[in-house]
């Protein structure tokens, strides 16, 4: 028996393929939108995983260090390191800033970390970790920096010695890892004009500039330029230690806020990126509805264009089932082509997006099912129209 | 019949291409794709060792010159940058009434000398008087013995002699007292002179004036500096070294110093001092490095990078330091075994600046360790070794 659907497709294959391609591009956009949403969530997740920490210890009463500013003394780790269940602690400083590179500005999240302690990048894709305590940096590939390049951050030149991948802030800015002391200096050191102005302001204060107490002014000024703060202490636990119990101990006895992995995920994903993620999700829903409508229209129009041929088929005695199967098969075929093309184009243009686009197989499978269901539903409308046609129309008008 | 065949061919061609593209996307982007890694073999090598620190140029010997008592500056003889010789007058404090008091002491001393002279003359007179009275009394005593004079006359003469002897003693005492007065006034004069000399600020060394901190007319408290003089041959770099990397520091080790003003040049020097007391707050040690040949135009307070060269670790089993990962308390590496990643705990030793680290235990020479990876590794993850992950 001849397959009516394939015969019909072969008859006008150009039209069919191009319709499928157009549909594919539309499905590709929808899949990419889902990928963008997944990418946002994933950005928050890699920030947590990439830090290699089990607990985040931050200033009391804050949601730091990513969602809110947090400031701790940089010797707070000493008292935490001695608590039971704690394997290692690491100071971390975070600062989002612009770095000039080759005449353009790159937005990066500057991360200050201590070598060999939690907070260092989990893996490198090129180069080596810093071997000095100053002026060497590891950059995420997204920054566009290359090994051996020198970049200027505030007062000092830093050499890029290593590259890493997928180390981004919650808002998708690539990270630049520098030694903690340098990051503290960058974060808390003011520019030269500000320092000079501040000195003059202190000198003008009679409480500090007292003629009878030589050296007081110098002492006060020296105390103003110290930077002994960090944003968080990252804690790695002993295998088998109870994160919630250690966090509770830290909150109770050290008067600091401590979050475990699940809480941090909740902060990042449910609080920090919630609005923008919902925004994307809303758009994704609208796009899906639009795609479904367009698919239905296309199939309906394709069938309507063939009404005369269908009437002829009826006239020569074709069964309703045969006609319905033909339309359904064509609709599903169109959906299949659209999905495959969509998945391919989504995969092709995903790396070109400035932020991470994560296409996960579950999304693709779900998308495939939805496309097929929509095509089937759309074909029902077309089938109803086709079956209602009078065979006489084939010879009429 | 020809046309449909061509069509079918074209269609199936397109279908094949699309299917291939789809398969490629799934294989390279999905979870099925193996993780790309670069691999290096553990090998024996000599590890050059160095320690890096940042410091500032300082003068080893710097002198703050100021008055020992509160006072007002009368004049400042030198300015910033002047070379000074030892003993050279640099500044002087206002003496107020010290000069007048000096003159009063001079006059008192002169008067004491004159008084001493007068006392000496009086002493001579008393001596002469006593001698005469004694002789006269002797004579009268003889005459009385032979009964030429009355006893009363002889007694009177003896009394005169005794009185003259007493007067001589008194004159002698007066003379001693005036001599003491001379010494006292001389000492007072000398003391006042020294107090006066204290107001003159002189350079203790041959050096350079590095700061002029107060101007004439300024009132200073005791100990406040007027001028700062440094010994320009004693410049060194005070460097801060992270305690974590400070093992093996010793006096005499060669260093290379890069000054902020000339970052490209590495000036040779040596460690001159390693402070016994480190900075507990910043977790750093203080090291002082002297220049072998101090460059011209060195400025105090200039930022300098110090690279301390240590003896290399010979014949160490080394791997790239990017391969070492940490979890819990221990360090480990991922080995490439049969296309899969396998974890191996290691202990690490010395590290070099070019990114090699010594492995003490856990590996043998020739073991293939995973250095770079395109994502975090896990046990039994399928990996594929490539030349490099990032285009150079």
Image: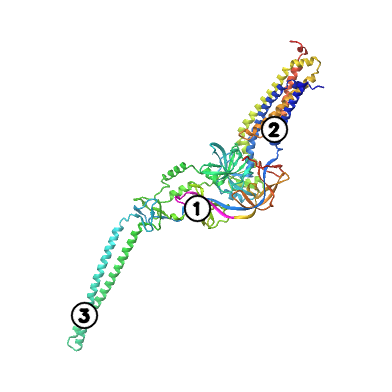
- Tag 2, which chain? A
Q: Which residue is mark 2?
A: A363
Disc 2 versus disc 1: nearer the observer:
1
Q: Which residue is mark 1?
A: B238
Dot 2, crowdedness within 10 Å: few (<14), some or many (≥20)?
A: some
Q: Compared to A97, does B60 lie above or below?
A: below
Q: Position of residue B134 (x, y in %)?
A: 22, 81
The residue lying toward the viewer, choosing from A170 and B36, is: B36
CA separation in Å, label 2 and label 3: 143 Å
Disc 3 versus disc 1: nearer the observer:
1
User: Are discs 2 and 1 both within one chain?
Assistant: no
Label 1 sits on a secondary structure element that is: strand
Disc with the residue nearer the chain's start (3 vs 1):
3
Q: Indicate whether residue B292 is drawn in magenta.
A: yes
Residue farthest to the left, as pictured = B148
How is the rendered protein coloured?
A: rainbow
- Tag 1, which chain? B
Q: Compared to B313, does A190 lie above or below?
A: above
The residue lying toward the viewer, choosing from A63 and B276, is: B276
Quarter of the image where the N terminus of chain A is located: top right
Dot 1, crowdedness within 10 Å: few (<14), some or many (≥20)?
A: many
Which picture quadrant has residue A55? Answer: top right
Residue farthest to the top, as pictured = A397
Question: What stretch of residues is rendered in magenta?
Answer: B289-311
User: Do the CB atoms of the residues marked 2 and 3 lie less than 8 Å apart?
Assistant: no
Q: Mark yes or no: residue B283 visible.
A: no
Q: Which residue is mark 3?
A: B133
């Amino acid at each position: 028996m001849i397959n009516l659907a394939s015969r019909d497709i072969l008859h006008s294959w150009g039209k069919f393929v191009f319709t499928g391609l157009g549909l594919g591009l539309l499905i590709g956009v929808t899949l990419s939108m889902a990928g963008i949403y997944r990418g946002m969530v994933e950005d928050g997740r890699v920030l947590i995983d990439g830090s290699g920490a089990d607990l985040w210890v931050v200033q009391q009463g804050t949601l730091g260090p990513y969602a809110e500013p947090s400031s701790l003394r940089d010797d707070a780790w000493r008292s935490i390191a001695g608590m039971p269940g704690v394997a290692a602690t690491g100071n971390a400083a975070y600062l989002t800033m612009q770095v000039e590179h080759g005449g353009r500005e790159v937005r990066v999240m500057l991360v200050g970390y201590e070598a060999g302690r939690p907070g260092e990048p989990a893996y490198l894709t090129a180069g080596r970790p810093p071997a000095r305590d100053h002026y060497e940096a590891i950059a995420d590939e997204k920054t566009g920096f290359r090994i051996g390049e020198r970049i200027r951050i505030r007062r000092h030149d830093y050499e890029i010695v290593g590259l890493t991948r997928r180390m981004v802030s919650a808002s998708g800015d690539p990270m630049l890892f520098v030694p903690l002391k340098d990051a503290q200096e960058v974060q808390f050191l003011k520019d030269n004009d500000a320092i000079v102005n501040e000195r003059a302001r202190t000198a003008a204060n009679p409480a500090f500039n007292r003629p009878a107490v030589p050296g007081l002014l110098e002492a006060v000024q020296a105390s103003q330029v110290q930077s002994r703060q960090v944003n968080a202490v990252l804690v790695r636990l002993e295998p088998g230690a109870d994160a919630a119990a250690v966090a509770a101990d830290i909150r109770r006895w050290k008067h600091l806020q401590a979050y475990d992995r699940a809480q941090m995920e909740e902060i990042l994903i449910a609080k920090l990126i919630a609005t923008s993620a919902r925004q994307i999700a809303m758009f994704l829903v609208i796009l899906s509805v639009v795609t479904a409508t367009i698919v239905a229209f296309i199939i309906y129009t394709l069938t309507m264009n063939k009404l005369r041929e269908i009437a002829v088929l009826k006239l020569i005695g074709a069964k309703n089932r045969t006609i319905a199967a033909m339309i359904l098969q064509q609709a599903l075929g169109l959906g299949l082509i659209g999905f495959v093309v969509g998945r391919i184009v989504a995969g092709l243009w995903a790396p070109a997006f400035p932020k991470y686009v994560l296409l996960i197989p579950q999304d693709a499978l779900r998308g495939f099912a939805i496309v097929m269901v929509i095509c089937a539903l759309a074909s029902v409308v077309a089938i109803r129209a086709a079956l209602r046609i009078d065979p006489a129309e084939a010879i009429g008008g | 019949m020809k046309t449909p065949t061509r069509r079918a061919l074209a269609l199936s061609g397109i279908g094949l291409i699309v299917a291939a593209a789809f398969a490629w996307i799934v294989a390279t982007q999905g979870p099925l794709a193996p993780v790309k890694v670069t691999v290096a073999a553990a090998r024996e090598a000599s590890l050059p060792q160095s320690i890096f620190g940042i410091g500032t140029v300082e003068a080893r010997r710097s002198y703050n010159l100021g008055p020992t008592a509160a006072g007002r500056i009368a004049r400042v003889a030198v300015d910033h940058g002047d070379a000074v010789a030892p003993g050279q007058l640099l500044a002087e404090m206002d003496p107020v009434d010290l000069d007048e008091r000096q003159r009063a002491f001079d006059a008192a001393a002169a008067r004491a000398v004159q008084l001493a002279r007068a006392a000496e003359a009086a002493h001579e007179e008393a001596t002469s008087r006593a001698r005469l009275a004694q002789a006269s009394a002797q004579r009268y005593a003889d005459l009385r013995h032979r009964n030429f004079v009355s006893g009363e006359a002889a007694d009177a003469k003896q009394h005169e002699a005794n009185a003259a002897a007493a007067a001589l003693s008194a004159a002698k005492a007066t003379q001693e007292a005036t001599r003491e007065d001379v010494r006292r006034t001389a000492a007072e004069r000398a003391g006042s002179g020294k107090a006066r000399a204290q107001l003159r600020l002189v350079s203790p060394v041959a050096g350079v004036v590095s700061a002029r901190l107060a101007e004439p007319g300024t009132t200073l408290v005791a100990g406040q500096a007027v001028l700062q003089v440094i010994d320009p041959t004693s410049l060194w770099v005070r460097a801060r070294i992270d305690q974590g990397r400070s093992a093996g520091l010793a006096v005499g080790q060669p260093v290379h110093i890069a000054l902020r003003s000339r970052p490209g040049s590495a000036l040779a020097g040596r460690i001159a001092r390693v402070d016994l007391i480190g900075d507990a707050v910043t977790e750093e040690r203080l090291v002082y490095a002297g220049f072998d040949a101090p460059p011209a135009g060195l400025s105090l307070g200039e930022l300098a990078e110090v690279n301390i060269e240590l003896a290399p670790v010979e014949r160490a089993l080394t791997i790239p330091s990017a391969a070492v990962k940490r979890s819990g308390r221990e360090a480990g590496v991922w080995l490439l075994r049969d296309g899969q990643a396998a974890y191996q705990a290691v202990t690490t030793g010395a590290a070099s600046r070019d990114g090699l680290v010594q492995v003490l235990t856990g590996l043998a020479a020739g073991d293939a360790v995973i250095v770079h990876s395109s994502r975090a590794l896990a046990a039994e993850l399928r990996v594929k070794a490539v030349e490099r992950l990032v285009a150079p």
